[in-house]
């Protein structure tokens, strides 16, 4: 009986280890190979690079990290990945080529619930709908302002 129990537990442990190994291999293969992040300092597992930003003023810490690792750095603050660009030329190039991406807002559950699936001008992502709503708001606001100016004179 003891022999059956021990062989069953060994088999179960081997299957669990094999399952974990297969999952790790699948995750590494499923990650987008085109998504290569810039280099940065070593990260801790839970807090990422937060420990390197604490102490002095954050912009001094980022300057020191830029001197060590270059003007394009990948930092992880908790679960959030951040790209820090510290040279004006790279910042101009990144913001010019990706301006549409940066113009849009991230989709939050709160905005979906409170503003009817992000349909208000504050939470809606950049696109044709946002441009149309913005045009309506600007037109109506200027119409009211024009009325006030006419009434005053």
Image (spheres, grey):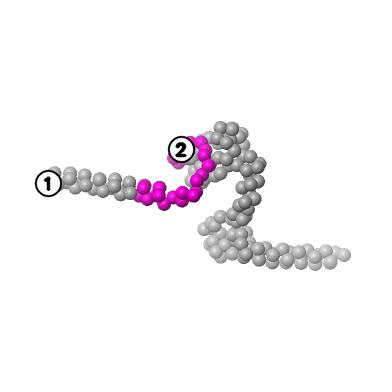
In the image, residue 132 lies at what x, y percent?
A: 66, 66
Q: Residue at x 61, y 34 (%)?
A: 63
> Considering depth in this image, is 33 or 99 the residue closer to the camera?
33
Q: Is residue 58 left or right of residue 44?
A: right
For the point 54% across and 57% down, the residue is 107
Q: Is residue 107 magenta?
A: no
The region drawn magenta spans 23-47
Label 1 environment density (alpha carbons within 10 Å; few <14, some 14–19, many ≥20): few
Q: Look at the image and tell me in which quarter the C terminus lies.
A: bottom right
Q: Which mark is residue 44?
A: 2
Determine if residue 114 is in view.
no
Q: Is residue 47 left or right of residue 131?
A: left
Q: Which residue is mark 1?
A: 1
Give percent across and percent down for residue 76: 51, 42
The image shows residue 17 at horizontal and vertical percentages of 29, 45
Q: Position of residue 105 (x, y in %)?
A: 59, 55
């Amino acid at each position: 009986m003891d022999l059956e129990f021990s062989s069953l537990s060994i088999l179960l442990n081997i299957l669990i280890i094999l399952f974990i190994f297969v999952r790790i291999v699948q995750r590494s293969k499923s990650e987008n190979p085109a998504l290569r992040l810039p280099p940065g300092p070593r990260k801790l597992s839970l807090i990422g690079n937060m420990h390197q930003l604490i102490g002095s003023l954050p912009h001094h810490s980022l300057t020191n990290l830029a001197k060590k690792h270059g003007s394009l750095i990948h930092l992880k603050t908790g679960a959030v990945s951040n790209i820090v660009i510290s040279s004006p030329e790279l910042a101009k190039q990144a913001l010019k080529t990706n301006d549409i991406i940066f113009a849009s807002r991230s989709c939050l559950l709160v905005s979906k619930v409170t503003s009817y699936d992000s349909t208000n001008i504050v939470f809606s992502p950049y696109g044709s709908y946002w441009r149309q709503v913005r045009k309506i708001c600007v037109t109506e606001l200027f119409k009211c302002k024009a009325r006030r100016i006419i009434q005053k004179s």
